[in-house]
Amino acid sequence: MSYVLCSDSGSLTPPLRQPLALGTLASAGIHGLLWLLVPLWPGANPPRITTPQTVRVVQLSPEQQRQLPQLDSPGVLLPHSAGNPSSFQPLIPKTGSGAELFPGSPPGTFPPFPSAGNSAPYTFSLTPPPPPSTLPPAAAMPPIAKGPTIKAPATPPPASRPSTSAPESLVATNPTFQPIPELSPTPTPSTAPAISPPTPSPEASVTPPAGDRPSQIPPAAIAHLQSLKQQFAYNPNGTTQGEAIASTKDWLAAAQTTAKSSQLLWKKLDLTTPYPKLACPSRLKGNATIGIVVDPQGKVVGDPDVIQSAGYPILNQAALAAISAHRFESTGEYQLFLAGFRFDASQGCPGDPAAQIDPPPSLREECLMSAFYDAIAPQFQQSRALPFRHHVEAYTYLNLIGEVTDQRILDLACGEGTYSRLLKQRGAARVVGVDISAQMIALAQQAEATQPLGIEYIVCDVQALGQIGDFDQVVASYLLNHAPTREQLLGMCQTIFANLKPGGRFVSINNHLEQPPETYGICEQYGFTKQISGDLREGTPITVSFPSEGSVFSIEDYYLSQDTYECALQTAGFPQVQWHSLSISPEGLQVFGADFWQDCLDYPPIIGISCQKPGASDS
């Protein structure tokens, strides 16, 4: 059996059978009906007022103003108007003179409210505000969900404003109203009470307590900074050559007293020390000389003495630290040492590699050599009496110099003036003696005072001498062998060349450069010794020692090859260099015999040098 469901809706078109379509048609019909009926509702169209209405403005006393609700206070609900629950009753009129509301302001009329289209301005009927006693209690604020606690400085409640501000109810009811701005956020003292600044909460403060932050730098830190500053402060005391010479004499006298030996002389001590890293940023330079007294057990006696200061305490301390770290040998007798230190930033600080080459002579080297010869001046003078020095050295040297009558002679490294006096006695017109040692020159001047010959003496380092004249001959005994580097040797040769007239000669007696070290022993029979530590290399020290009245004094020479000598002399301007063997005086041969001098001739410990400056016709 089959059933068929019949419906009258089959007569509607398919789109109108949908529920959505039916709902839309019903809503449109209801809204159209309301649109036609609302204008007919009583009171919907109030009569229009075409002329402005004048209303009376009531001035509130300060007591009444304090009873007005604060609209900006949280939790206060304004009461509804009795006539219209959906709107607030205005508290002041739209128009008026404004004199009652704003005391002190010029009388005037408020501007009319803006109108919408052609409609007349809105007007409000003024009703007195409800008495304060009729205000409902403030509604409680809903609880706020607890979150992270944020502590901030407590803020005092806002102070009551003076009556020069517009009532906030007017601003609330008329958004287009612009209140008169206050000229200052702080009222004048005559019209408002003073307001204390807010006091921040101690818990919210981020400033550390006074106990955690010192109010001043601790005295210990200040003392440390001042000490560091003094380490880098330059002090010129004790840096000059004259001061170094005086210090050497005083130190030597005290050291001889300690050792109970007036004949004890000092030796040169070669030590090196790293450049202080703290001095690298300032790139300090200086030269220090330290005097050390060592007892028979190899222990340093007392504190080492700063003979010459480097000028900076940090450099002097580095030199003293090197002395303290050095271990001295036990020799069974007292020993005296002078140790020289040269400080240059190029030694241990980053810089130009070109700065690593051997520098020109420093003040340290000048002062050290000067102080050395000052100390041995009397002993050196006495060594002239050795047969070797008289019959070999002087005889060979004076023969190389030759005729000097009416000549001008410059005697470099003149010492105590022995050869200067001999040349003057042989007929030289003028003799000028130059030596780095003030004590040596003092001995020469004593001889000049005893027997005046008219010789001039100058205390100066040869490399710093410069040109002091045009001489027929420049002579030098044991000068060039004191140069430890090629640069210093060249400096000496340039001074020699500069002081020669065109065609003038240079003559010198010098340590023999190529004498084999294994033959140094032959020197003992001639009254002196030669020693070398290591192989013959450029700059190797060679120590020459002489006995003197129960003690020994030593002189330090340096090895530079014969090729290096010739290169320096030729670079200075001499076209040729001649080397001369030794000669024995007839008196020496007669007194000591030829066999005595044979070793000296076979392995000569010294040698002669001569050069000639090109003449005017040769240039």
Image: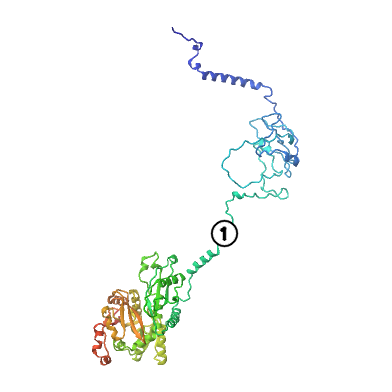
**Residue 25, placed above or below residue 507:** above
Q: How many marks?
A: 1
Percent coordinates x, y for residue 321 in the rendering: 42, 71
Q: In this view, does 134 lie above or below 419?
A: above
Q: In this view, does 421 lie to the left or right of 563?
A: right
Which coloring applies here? rainbow
Q: Which of 284 and 316 is in front in this view?
A: 316
Q: In this view, does 392 lie to the left or right of 109?
A: left
Label 1: which secondary element: loop
Residue beneath the point at 57% across and 59% down: 214
Q: Mark 1 points at which residue?
A: 214
Compare residues 265 and 207 and report the one nearer the observer.
265
Query: Which quadrant holds the C terminus?
Result: bottom left
Q: Quadrant of residue 23?
A: top right
Q: Is 153 left, or right, of 222 in this rendering?
A: right
Residue 616 visible within the image: no
Which x, y percent locates residue 432?
Answer: 38, 85
Mark 1 Cα-neighbour bin, 10 Å: few <14, some 14–19, many ≥20: few
Q: Which of 263 and 429 is in front in this view?
A: 263
Indicate the position of residue 89 as horizontal and vertical percent values.
Answer: 70, 33
* Location of the N terminus (image quadrant): top left
